[in-house]
């Protein structure tokens, strides 16, 4: 059966030379979170779909220390609210090991995931439940089994969303994304959170019209380089 709608959002290369991607697929009814593993020749090793009766989607994926993979995104099929952050752990063979949801009564999405030095995970995205009007950037820290450890709400004056995460050697995490300060334009932002979930610093680069940081990397000199969307 061919999917009537599908899309891959993020992929990674495994140590064995294979690749694993996540996104969403729709064979019938509502979309599911979709994971695909393929080799360096482009041959499919396995595919898996996870979901329920609601809309479900994968946004990002990371390897785990044990050789498995953890994908994150959102689910409207499970959890506490209309949409919740969702993370799923699978083995190297794509077998489901566990899943976790995080959310409240509104809409929560995980747009990024990073593997922590201790084998746990950072999830980053946004929550509409933490402020009365606008979305707040939201980071959730879990242990290696996906169990909740702490979270931090990076509230802005208007909408704030995390698009990428980078775990740091000190146990913290750096996030980048989109900030809407409500001044006729938007801003790229980066923020550092320490290992206890406390904010260390935040920087914003404003531009008229639209701008956001979609991804970033650490540089050899200790700095960071971000790439995103400038329109002006």
Image (cartoon, grey):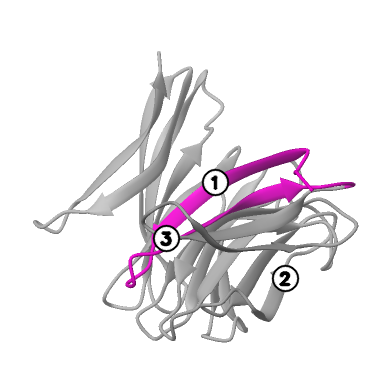
Nearer to us in this view, 11 or 172: 11
Tag count: 3
Q: Was residue 13 drawn as part of the magenta stretch in this picture?
A: yes
What residue sits right under mark 1 in the picture?
A: 9
Q: Is residue 198 above or below residue 164?
A: below
Q: Was residue 26 drawn as part of the magenta stretch in this picture?
A: yes
Q: Secondary structure at mark 3?
A: loop
Q: Is residue 88 above or below residue 66?
A: above
Q: Residues within 10 Å of mark 3 (few under 14, many from 20)?
A: some
Q: Is any atom of residue 201 visible in this view?
A: yes
The image quarter containing residue 225 is: top left
Q: Which residues are magenta?
A: 1-29
Residue 130 in the figure: left or right of residue 190? right
Q: Residues within 10 Å of mark 1 (few under 14, many from 20)?
A: some
Mark 3 or 1: in front is: 3
Point 68% across, 42% down: residue:
6
Which label sits on residue 39?
A: 3
Q: Is residue 93 above or below residue 17?
A: below
Residue 55 in the figure: left or right of residue 224? right
Q: Whole-percent x and y of residue 85?
A: 68, 62
Q: Is residue 181 above or below residue 38?
A: above
Q: Whole-percent x and y of residue 94?
A: 60, 73
Nearer to us in this view, 10 or 200: 10
Mark 2 / mark 1, whichever is N-terminal: 1
């Amino acid at each position: 059966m061919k999917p009537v709608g599908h899309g891959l959002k993020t992929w990674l290369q495994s140590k064995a030379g294979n690749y694993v991607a996540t996104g969403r697929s729709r064979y019938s009814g509502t979309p599911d979170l979709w994971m695909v593993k393929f080799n360096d020749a482009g041959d499919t090793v396995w595919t898996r779909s996870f979901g329920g009766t609601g809309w479900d989607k994968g946004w990002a994926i990371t390897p785990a220390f044990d050789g498995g993979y953890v994908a994150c995104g959102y689910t409207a099929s499970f959890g506490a609210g209309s949409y919740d952050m969702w993370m799923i752990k699978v083995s190297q063979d794509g077998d489901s090991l566990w899943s976790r949801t995080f959310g409240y009564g509104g809409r929560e999405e995980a747009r990024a995931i990073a593997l922590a030095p201790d084998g746990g995970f950072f999830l980053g995205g946004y929550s509409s439940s933490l402020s009365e009007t606008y979305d707040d950037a939201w980071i959730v820290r879990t242990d290696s089994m996906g169990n909740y450890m702490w979270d931090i709400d990076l509230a802005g004056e208007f909408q704030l969303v995390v698009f990428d995460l980078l775990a740091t050697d000190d146990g913290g995490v750096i996030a980048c994304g989109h900030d809407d300060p409500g001044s006729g334009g938007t801003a790229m932002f980066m923020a550092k959170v320490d290992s206890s979930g406390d904010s260390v610093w935040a920087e914003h680069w404003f531009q008229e019209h639209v701008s956001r940081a979609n991804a970033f990397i650490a540089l050899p000199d200790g700095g960071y380089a971000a790439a995103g969307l400038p329109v002006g």
